[in-house]
Amino acid sequence: MRLLRRRLGPLAGTLAAVLLASACAGAGSTPTGGADKADSAPGVTDDKVVIGTHQPLTGPAAPGYSTISAGARAMYSYINDKGGIHGRKIDYRVEDDGYNPTRTVEVVKKLVLQDEVFAIVGGLGTPTHSKVVDFLNSERVPDLLVASGALRWDDVAKSPTTFGFQVDYTREGKILGSHIRNNLGGQKVGVLHQNDDVGRDGMKGLDQFIADAVVSRQPYDPANTDVLPQITALKNAGAQVVVCECVPAFTALAILTSARLGYKPQFVVSSIGADPRTLAGLLADFAKRGGTEVSAGALLGGLIGAGYLPDAAADDPWITLFKEVHQKYIPTVPLTNTVVYGMAQAYTFAQALKEAGHDVTRQKIIDTMTSGALKGPGLTPFAFGPDSHSGYTGAYIFKVNPDTSTTMIAAPVVTDRENGPIKPAPTTRKTPTEIALVR
Amino acid sequence: MAADTVIAPAPPAPVTSRAGLSPLARHLLLAVLALAAIVLLSMVVDPFTNVRLATVGYYLLAVAGLTVLTGLTGQVSLGHGAFMFVGAYTVALLVVYVPALPFWVDLLLAAVASGLAGALTGAAAARLTGPYLAGATLALAVGLPSVTQRFPDFLGGSNGLGFTVNSMPAGLAGTVPSTRWQAWVVWAVVLAALVLLANLTRGRVGRRLRAVRDDEVSAALAGIHVGRMKVFAFLVSAVCAGLAGGLQAFLLGTAAPGSFTPALSLSLLAAMVLGGVGSLWGALWGALALVFLQAGSEELTHALALGTDVSNNLPLAIYGLVLIGVVLAFPQGIHGIGRTLRTRLRPRRTPARTSADDEGEA
C-alpha cells in the first residue's frame, strides 16, 4: 500500500492542482479585463460582412416569431442584389435556439468563435439573449437591435456594445396604461403576463396609470401552454379589461381559452403579441389542432394593441418598399407585421453599416449607433445616443377590425422609461427614397 | 479534491491486472493520460471546438452516472435531467449570491445538493420497479424545473439565472483563451469523477450492486442490505448528473428551466443505450454521439439548404435512426461493436475477460 501511495501521489496531485488552480478568486467576482479588441473588424472582407443571429425557429416562441428572420433575409437579399453596402454583401447566418437559453449560449458562441461574425443582429428573446450579453460584451462583439423590449439592453456602462430595437416594455406599458385610464376608465383590469422581464418591465409602466384598477395579475410560463387556470382567475376576479403582456402564441391561447369559457373581456395587447395577421394564423392553427374551426375575425375584432412600425397594410412609403421586397423574395410567406419587423430591423442594421463608412470596425459601428444618425421605418424616433441604448421611444394604439385589418385609434406618442410625461411623437419621418440606402 | 478521496474506496486487497498495476493505479494513469490528451487537443483546435469538447465532457459524466445506475443495479431513471437541474442551479445560486466562494467549492456543494436529491429519490425509487420507477423519475424531470416558476424572484422564473463564472487564475488570464481553460477544468473534474466511479464499480460496492441487480433475494441472503444499495446507487448516479449540471452552468454561464426539459433526460438515456449500457467507455461514445452527431447533422442540413420544417427535425431523425440501427445490429451499443471485433481478432483473450472487467473499464 505504501508503494502504491508513493506512486500515485504525483499523479493525483496533478489532478488536484488543476482543480485547486481555480481557487485563486471567488467564482462570482469580476475577472480582470482582457485586451481591447474593439478596433478590429472580424467577419468583414472586401466583398462581404458576416453577421449572425439567434432565432426561435422551433419551440414555444416559434409560432409567430419564426418568420422574422425570413423577412430580414429577404431584405438583405434585396440589398445584396442592389450591390450591397460599400460594395460588400451581407452574409446573414441564422441559428435556431428553440427559445432555450442553453442552446442560445451554444449557437452564439458558435457564431462568434467559429463563424467569426462581425456582429450579432436582432438576437431574439429576453430569457435567451440575456444569457449572452455578458459574453458578447466581454468579446466586444457589437450586439445590435436586440429583438426584445426588456430594459436591460439599455445599460451603457455595463453593456456598451448592446443596443435595443423595439420600444421597451416600460415605455409601452405607460402608453397602454394611459390609454386604458383615459378611454376605459372605471373598468376592472386584469393582467396576463409572461413570467419574466416582459411582465415585470411592462407592469412597471402600466402601474404608473392603472395600479388601482388592477384586480388580478396572472403570470404564465412559456413552457406550459395551458392558460386555463390564469384565464379562470381573471374571469373570477371580474376583470373587464385584460392586458396581455404576451408573445403571440400566448395571446392566441388566451383569446381561445377565454372564448371557451364564454368570457369576453376587452383585450389590450402589447406590441410583441399584437400582430393581427400572425394571431389569425395561430388561432386557426391552434383551433384546428383542438379539432374545431374558429372565425379569427370574430375573435380578434375589437382587440386593442400597440405598435411602433407601420402596419403591413398601411399606406406608407416604407410598406411600399417592404411589399416590393416581399413580392420578389418571399411571396409564399404571408406579409404580416412580424415579417415587416424583420425587414425593418435588417434595414436599420444596413443603414448603420453604411453610416459607419467604408473602413468599418466594431468600434465604428457602435459609434454610429450612438451618433443619433439612424432614422428608421418606425413611427417614433430611436432613443439611441451616448447615454441611451434604447430603441424606439414610443408607440401608437390600434384597434383590430372584424376583417383583421387595423385602424389607428391613438396617434404615435413618445415617453421615457422613468416617470416622464407622454408627448406626441414628431410627425416628420424620412422615407426610403430620402435615406437612399441602395441605388 | 481527488487526492485523498481517491485512495479511500480502494479494495482492501488490490487485484493486479495484466499490466501489473492495481485497478486504481491503472484508472488514475488512464485519467492523467486522457487529461494530457485533452490539453493537447484543446491547444490545436479552434475556440468553439473547445466548447464542444467541454460539452462532451459534462455529458459523458451525466451518461456515466446513468450507466452505473442502470448497468449495475438495473434501475432505470428517466429523470436525470432533474439532477442536472439541481447541480446547475446550485452553482448558479452560489455564483450569484455568494460570489466570494471559489468555483471548486461551488461544484462540491452542487455534488452535495444533487446527492441529497438523489438519495431522497432513491429512497422512493427503491420501492418501485419497471414502469413505476420510470414513471416516478419522469415525473421528477417534468416537475422539478417548475420550481423556478414558484419562486420567480429567487430562481429567476422562466428567465433563469445568468452569470459569468470567474475561475481562471490571475496568472493565466490573457495567455490561455477562456474556452480552452473551461475545457481543461471540465475534463479535470470529469476524469477525477470517472476514476472514482471506475474504482467504485470494480470494488466491493460494485460486486454488491451487481449482486442486487442479478437476484435481490440471494443478495439479501448473503447479507447485503438491498434497499440501502439501491439508494446508494441512485445517490452516486445523481452526484454525477449534478456535477455535470454544475459544469454546464460553469461552461455556459446560465441556468434556466428551459434547458432541463424531459427531452434532456430522454436524450441522456438514449446516449447511454447508444454507447452501451453498463460501460463507462460506452458513456464516452454516447456523449460523443450526443454532441457531434447533432452538430454534424445540423451542419449537413445547413449545407443542403432545406426548408425550415425539414432542417429543424432532420438532426433528431438522424439521431433516432442511428440509435435504432445500432440497437438492432449491436444490442450492446457502440461499445459492443469494439468488443465484438476484439473478441474475433484476439480469441485467446476471451476467457480472461469477465463481466466485472467490462463494467469496470474507465
Image: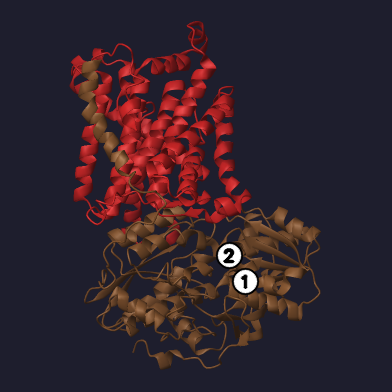
Which colouring convention does the figure follow? by chain
Q: Is residue A16 above or below residue A96?
A: above
Q: Secondary structure at mark 1?
A: loop
Chain letter for brown, please.
A
Chain letter for red, please.
B
What is the number of the mark on residue A118? Answer: none
Q: Secondary structure at mark 2?
A: helix
* Coordinates of residue A79 in the picture (x, y in percent): 35, 81
Residue B232 visible within the image: yes
* Chain to which the residue tagged by mark 1 belongs: A
Answer few, some or many: residues within 10 Å of disc 1's Cα (few below 14, many 20 plus, some between 14 and 19): many
- Check if mark 1's residue and mark 2's residue have beta carbons within 8 Å: yes
* Coordinates of residue B80 in the picture (x, y in percent): 48, 36
Q: Quadrant of the N terminus of chain A?
A: top left
Residue at 18%, 23% (x, y): give it. Answer: B345
Residue assigned mark 2? A198
Residue assigned mark 1? A270
Amino acid under disc 2:
Val
Q: Is residue A116 above or below residue B23?
A: below
* Chain to which the residue tagged by mark 2 belongs: A
- Toward which corner of the image does residue A373 lie, by quadrant? bottom left
Answer few, some or many: residues within 10 Å of disc 2's Cα (few below 14, many 20 plus, some between 14 and 19): many
* Coordinates of residue A192 in the picture (x, y in percent): 68, 62
* Coordinates of residue B14 in the picture (x, y in percent): 28, 14
Image-based side of A20 in relation to A192, left or right: left
Image-based side of A239 in relation to A430, left or right: right
